[in-house]
Image (cartoon, rainbow, N blue to C red):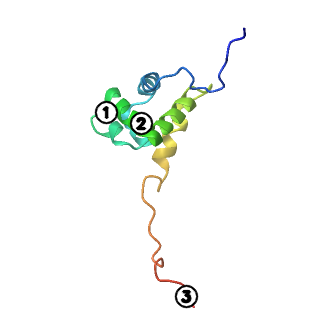
Amino acid sequence: MSEFKSNDPLHGVTLVMIMDHLAATFSWQELALIVPINCFKSNPSIKSSLNFLRKTPWARTEIEHLYLRSIEEGFRKELIIPRVLTTPKGLQKPKKNPLRGFGRMA
């Protein structure tokens, strides 16, 4: 019989393996800039990150995408980090529209 081969690049890769790889590739500060979640910002550890990521699907998805980008051939973390750091308004909340809420003008 032929073996089944999955097309999923995360097949057989556990969350522990993903976090070990990312912790070795990036610093906790860099991870907090790329994916702004508190488990990377305050008292970061792999254990606390795993607890949070297992309970929060959107954060797990972000981490999985970062992992997939980091294992690509020719990956350079300099291509990810400066984009976050040099965006002038990338980390700020957008300003509210001052005209919003005044209704439709006739």
The mark closer to the camera, 3 or 2, is: 3
Q: Is residue 32 left or right of residue 43?
A: right
* Residue type at numbered disc 3: Met
* Residue type at numbered disc 1: Pro
Residue nearer the viewer, 14 or 94: 14
Residue nearer the viewer, 21 or 62: 62
Image mark for residue 44: 1
Q: Secondary structure at mark 3?
A: loop
Q: Position of residue 105 (x, y in %)?
A: 55, 88
Task: Kindly identify which residue carries mark 3.
Answer: 105
Rounded to the nearest angstrom, the CA distance separating label 1 from label 2 is 10 Å
Q: Is residue 5 above or below residue 64?
A: above
Do the numbered discs 1 and 2 sit on residues whose CB atoms are within 8 Å?
yes
Rounded to the nearest angstrom, the CA distance separating label 3 from label 1 is 51 Å
The residue positioned 57% from the left and 91% from the top of the image is: 106
Q: Is residue 106 left or right of residue 58?
A: right
Task: Kindly identify which residue carries mark 2.
Answer: 31
Q: Earlier in the sequence, mark 3 or mark 2?
A: 2
Q: Position of residue 48 (x, y in %)?
A: 32, 31
Rounded to the nearest angstrom, the CA distance separating label 3 from label 2 is 46 Å
Q: Secondary structure at mark 2?
A: helix
